[in-house]
C-alpha cells in the first residue's frame, strides 16, 4: 500500500517517525534534568508486575487496531500485486485493433494483417523502453479431454510467434524444464496447468476443440506453468502459424503483446511512457484536434472536474491532466495519449451522458470511434494501481470502522492513568508539599506512561499483525470453500511496522501527557491526608456565616 | 519591634461537604518570632492541622492574611509558592512522610533538586543532613526498610536540608513509641536551639509542648490562648462582623 487517506505512506512514515523521535528527545532531555522524577515515575513499575501487565494490555488497544488495519492492507495489496505479477509476468501492455472488420466474429478481438505488426516493429526499432514485441492470436473455444471427458467452456487458444519470444522468457513445464514451441509437431500443443486442472489432463492426452463446426484434436505435449504468454486462465498454446490456420486467419493477428525493459516490476514503471508512445503512433491527430475543440468547453470541463472526486485515484490524476491539456494552446502528445486511453474515454462518455450534453455526446462518440486504430491497454500498471487502491481502501475501511474502538482505547488509557494517579495521590501530595511543582508531577506521570507506551506499542504492533494474519487465514479458507484460485499471502512491510508503532505510540503518548496534566491538578492537603478532593476545594462565599456552620470533625 | 517569621491575622477557613459547611478556622490570629518553637495544641477537630496547612500555604484561606518572613504567601502563583516552599520551608508529617519509591537520601535531596540545586551538591547536602540525624548508614534504604523512628528522622533531615526559615511539623511523634518519640523531640529541640530555625508544631503530646517556647491552645477553630496572654473566644457578634468583613 502506497497511500492512506490520500497521503503517501512514505511521507506518513517520515512524519510520525519525526514526531516520535522529537517527543522522545524532549522526554530524554527532561529525564536528564529531573532524574528524581524519572525515578519516581519508573521505579513503581517493576514492583507491581501483575498490574503492569494489565496496564500494558489496556494501553495497547489502539495500537493493535492500527497495526491490524495496516497489516491487513499490506497483505491485500501484496497479494493482489503478487497475483498480477504472477499472471502477467513479463507482459506490460496489450495492443488490440480498435476497429472491427466485416469478417471479424462477435465477441473476439478484431483481426489486422500481420504487416501492421511488422510496421510497428520498424517504428519502435529505436525505442529503448521496449524489450519485447510479439504478435499473437487469442480466441476462446470449448474444449474436451477425450480421456477424462472433462470439458472447459472457455479454453483460450493462444497462437504465439516462436521466433519473437525475446523479452518474454520461455515456456516452462511444471516440472521446471524449459520447452520450445518449435518442438511441437503438427497436432501437438502445450496447455497451462490451469487447463490441466480443469480438464484433468496430462501429457499425452488428446483434447478436442470446437471451432465453428470443426473439431480439431490436439495431443498434449506438456503442461506448462501458467502466467505471461501461457495465460492465467485455461490456455492451449500453439505456434502462431498453426493458430492462424486453425481459425482461418492466415496472415492475420488479433493482438500484439508488449514487454517493457527491466524485470516484471520495473517494466510496469515504464508503462505510462510506453503507452503514450504507442497511443501517439496509432492516433489520428486530425480527429484528436477536433475532439480537443469539442471537449474544451466550460460545461464539459466543469463536469469533468465534478466527476473527478468519484473516480479511482489513478484515473483522477489522468482526468485532472486531461482538463489541463484540453485548455492548452497546442495538441500535445500527452493529450493524444489521454484521449486514446479507454479508461478516460469511458469517463468522458459518462460525464457527457450524466450531464445530458446529448449533442456533444453524439459527436464525441463518432470522433472517438475514428480516433485510434489500436487500443493500448496498460494491464500491469492498472492492476498494480488497483492493488494499491484496494490496500488503501482496506485500511481506510478498517480505520473508519475502528474509530470507535480507538476512542474507547484512548478513554481506557485515561482511566488507567487516573487510577494510577489515585493510588499514588498521597505521594503526589507529599511531593508537592516539599516543593515539587505541578510540572514535576506531569513529568513523573509522563515518564511512567511513556515506559508503558513503549512496551505496549511494541506488543500492540505484534498482536495487531497477528490479528491481521489470523484474518487472512480465515479469508483464505473462505476463498478455498468457493474453489477460488486466489489466496492471500501474509505480508507486512517494515514501513508498516514503523508507522503502526509510531502512530500507536504517539496516540498513547499524547493521551498519557493530557491525562498526566489532568491528574497533576490536586489539592495538596487533601492528597496528603487522603481526603476527598471536593471537600477541601469547595469554599463558601455566598451564604451567611452562621448557616449550617459546624465545628470541623477530624480536621484538627 | 519583634522579628516575626509568621504574621497571620483574621484567618477564616470553611469546608463544604456538599450537605454541610464546616467552619474550621474563625478569625485566627497568630504571630511566631524568628527562632521560636511554638506548639499548637488542642482536642481533635479543633482546627490545629488546618491552621498549620493555611499558615504554610499548603491550603487556601477564605479570608485574612498570612505573611511568612514578610511575604504574602497566598498571593503567589502556584509555581512560585511551590518554589518558596522548597527553598524556605520544611515539613514533617505524622503519616505519609516519605516517598516510598525513593531511598532515604533521595527523599532528603528532593526539595533541593526540585528547586534547581545541582545533583552533586544536593547529594552532598542530603548526606550531611542524614549524618546530622544519625542515618548515614541507612542512606540508600527505601522507607519500607526503615523503622518508624528512622523514617521520621529522614523526614526531619528532609525538612532541614534546604536550611529553611521555618519548619512545620504535624504530629511529628504521633505514630512513634514513647522512647523513639523522646529521641525525636530531643532532636527537634536540639536543631531548633542549634540552628535558630523556627518550628511550628501541631501536637497532642504534652512533653513536646513543655519543650517548646510557647503553647498555642485551640478549640472549635479559635485560639483560646496563644501563650502570650492574648486570644480568647469571640462573641457571636464579633464572629458575624468578622465573617462579613471576610466577604461572606
Image (spheres, helix red, strand yellow):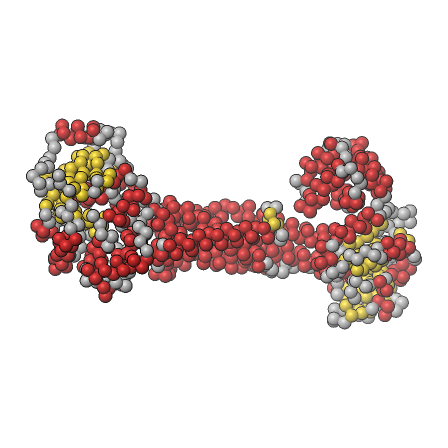
- In the image, residue A309 lies at what x, y percent? 66, 40
- In the image, residue A466 lies at what x, y percent? 53, 59
In the image, is A336 to the left or to the right of B34?
right
Rendered residue at 90%/47% (across/down) = A101
Query: Of A427 and A549, which appears nearest the observer?
Result: A427
- In the image, residue A108 lies at what x, y percent? 84, 51
Which quarter of the rendered picture does the N terminus of chain B lie within?
top left
Rendered residue at 84%/67% (across/down) = A181
In the image, is B237 to the left or to the right of B118?
left
Rendered residue at 77%/69% (across/down) = A173
Query: Of B220 and A467, which appears nearest the observer?
Result: B220
Q: Give the farthest residue toward the front.
A: B1
Q: Say which quarter of the image contains residue B130.
A: bottom left
Which quarter of the rendered picture does the C terminus of chain B lie within?
top left
**Above or below for A326 versus A256:** above
Rendered residue at 69%/37% (across/down) = A305
In the image, is A388 to the left or to the right of A49?
right
- In the image, residue B139 lies at what x, y percent? 25, 63
Amino acid at each position: 500500500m502506497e497511500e492512506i487517506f490520500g497521503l503517501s505512506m512514505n511521507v506518513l512514515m517520515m512524519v510520525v517517525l519525526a514526531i516520535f523521535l522529537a517527543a522522545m528527545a524532549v522526554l530524554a532531555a527532561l529525564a536528564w534534568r529531573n532524574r528524581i522524577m524519572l525515578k519516581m515515575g519508573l521505579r513503581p513499575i517493576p514492583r507491581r508486575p501483575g498490574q503492569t501487565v494489565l496496564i500494558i494490555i489496556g494501553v495497547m488497544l489502539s495500537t493493535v487496531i492500527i497495526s491490524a488495519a495496516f497489516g491487513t492492507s499490506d497483505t491485500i495489496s501484496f497479494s493482489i500485486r503478487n497475483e498480477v505479477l504472477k499472471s502477467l509476468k513479463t507482459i506490460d501492455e496489450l495492443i488490440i485493433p480498435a476497429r472491427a472488420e466485416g469478417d471479424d466474429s462477435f465477441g473476439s478481438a478484431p483481426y489486422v494483417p500481420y504487416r501492421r505488426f511488422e510496421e510497428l516493429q520498424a517504428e519502435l526499432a529505436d525505442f529503448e523502453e521496449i524489450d519485447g514485441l510479439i504478435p499473437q492470436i487469442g480466441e476462446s473455444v470449448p474444449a474436451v479431454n477425450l480421456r477424462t471427458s472433462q470439458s472447459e467452456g472457455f479454453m483460450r487458444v493462444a497462437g504465439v510467434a516462436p521466433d519473437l519470444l525475446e523479452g518474454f522468457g520461455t515456456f516452462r513445464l511444471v516440472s521446471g524444464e524449459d520447452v520450445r514451441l518449435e518442438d511441437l509437431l503438427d497436432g501437438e500443443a502445450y496447455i497451462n496447468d490451469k487447463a490441466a486442472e480443469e480438464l484433468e489432463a496430462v501429457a499425452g492426452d488428446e483434447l478436442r476443440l470446437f471451432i465453428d463446426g470443426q473439431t480439431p484434436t490436439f495431443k498434449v505435449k506438456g503442461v506448462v506453468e501458467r502466467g505471461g504468454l501461457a495465460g492465467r486462465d485455461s490456455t492451449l498454446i500453439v505456434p502462431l502459424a498453426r493458430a492462424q490456420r486453425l481459425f482461418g486467419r492466415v496472415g492475420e493477428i488479433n493482438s500484439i503483446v508488449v514487454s517493457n525493459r527491466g524485470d516484471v516490476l520495473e517494466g510496469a514503471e515504464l508503462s505510462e511512457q510506453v503507452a503514450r508512445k504507442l497511443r501517439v503512433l496509432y492516433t489520428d491527430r486530425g480527429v484528436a484536434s477536433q475532439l480537443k475543440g469539442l471537449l474544451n468547453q466550460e460545461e464539459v470541463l466543469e463536469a469533468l472536474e465534478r466527476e473527478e472526486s468519484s473516480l479511482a485515484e489513478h484515473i483522477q490524476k489522468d482526468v485532472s491532466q486531461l482538463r489541463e491539456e484540453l485548455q492548452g494552446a497546442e495538441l500535445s502528445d500527452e493529450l493524444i495519449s489521454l484521449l486514446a486511453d479507454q479508461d478516460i474515454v469511458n469517463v468522458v462518455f459518462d460525464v457527457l451522458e450524466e450531464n445530458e450534453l446529448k449533442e456533444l455526446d453524439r459527436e464525441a462518440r463518432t470522433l472517438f470511434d475514428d480516433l485510434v486504430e489500436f487500443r493500448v491497454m496498460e494491464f500491469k500498471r492498472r492492476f498494480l494501481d488497483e492493488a494499491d487502491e484496494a490496500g488503501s481502501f482496506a485500511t481506510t475501511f478498517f480505520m473508519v470502522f475502528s474509530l470507535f474502538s480507538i476512542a474507547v482505547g484512548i478513554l481506557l488509557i485515561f482511566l488507567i492513568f487516573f487510577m494510577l494517579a489515585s493510588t499514588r495521590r498521597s505521594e503526589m501530595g507529599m511531593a508537592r508539599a516539599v516543593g515539587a511543582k505541578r510540572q514535576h508531577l506531569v513529568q513523573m506521570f509522563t515518564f511512567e506512561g511513556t515506559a508503558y507506551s513503549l512496551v505496549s506499542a511494541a506488543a500492540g504492533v505484534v498482536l495487531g499483525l497477528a490479528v491481521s494474519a489470523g484474518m487472512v487465514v480465515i479469508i483464505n479458507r473462505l476463498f478455498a470453500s468457493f474453489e477460488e484460485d486466489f489466496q492471500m499471502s501474509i505480508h507486512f512491510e517494515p514501513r508498516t511496522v514503523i508507522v503502526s508503532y509510531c502512530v500507536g505510540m504517539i496516540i498513547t503518548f499524547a493521551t498519557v501527557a493530557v491525562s498526566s496534566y489532568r491528574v497533576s491538578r490536586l489539592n495538596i492537603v487533601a492528597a496528603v491526608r487522603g481526603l476527598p478532593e471536593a471537600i477541601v476545594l469547595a469554599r463558601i462565599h455566598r451564604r451567611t456565616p452562621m448557616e449550617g456552620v459546624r465545628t470541623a470533625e477530624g480536621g484538627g | 519591634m519583634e522579628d516575626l517569621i509568621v504574621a497571620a491575622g483574621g484567618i477564616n477557613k470553611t469546608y463544604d461537604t456538599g450537605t454541610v459547611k464546616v467552619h474550621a478556622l474563625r478569625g485566627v490570629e497568630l504571630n511566631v518570632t524568628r527562632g521560636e518553637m511554638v506548639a499548637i495544641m488542642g482536642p481533635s477537630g479543633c482546627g490545629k492541622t488546618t491552621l498549620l496547612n493555611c499558615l504554610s500555604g499548603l491550603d487556601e484561606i477564605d479570608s485574612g492574611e498570612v505573611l511568612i518572613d514578610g511575604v504574602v504567601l497566598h498571593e503567589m502563583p502556584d509555581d512560585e509558592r511551590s518554589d518558596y516552599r522548597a527553598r524556605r520551608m520544611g515539613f514533617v508529617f505524622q503519616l505519609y512522610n516519605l516517598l516510598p519509591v525513593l531511598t532515604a537520601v533521595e527523599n532528603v535531596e528532593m526539595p533541593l533538586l526540585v528547586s534547581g540545586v545541582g545533583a552533586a551538591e544536593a547529594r552532598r547536602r542530603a548526606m550531611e543532613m542524614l549524618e546530622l540525624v544519625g542515618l548515614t548508614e541507612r542512606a540508600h534504604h527505601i522507607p519500607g526498610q526503615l523503622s518508624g523512628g528512622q523514617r521520621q528522622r529522614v523526614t526531619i533531615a528532609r525538612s532541614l536540608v534546604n536550611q529553611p526559615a521555618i519548619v512545620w511539623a504535624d504530629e511529628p511523634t504521633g505514630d512513634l513509641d514513647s522512647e523513639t518519640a523522646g529521641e525525636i523531640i530531643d532532636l527537634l529541640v536540639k536543631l531548633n536551639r542549634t540552628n535558630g530555625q523556627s518550628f511550628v508544631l501541631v501536637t497532642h503530646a504534652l512533653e513536646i509542648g513543655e519543650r517548646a517556647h510557647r503553647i498555642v491552645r485551640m478549640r472549635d477553630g479559635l485560639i483560646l490562648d496563644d501563650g502570650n496572654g492574648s486570644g480568647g473566644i469571640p462573641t457571636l457578634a464579633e464572629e458575624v462582623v468578622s465573617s462579613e468583613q471576610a466577604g461572606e
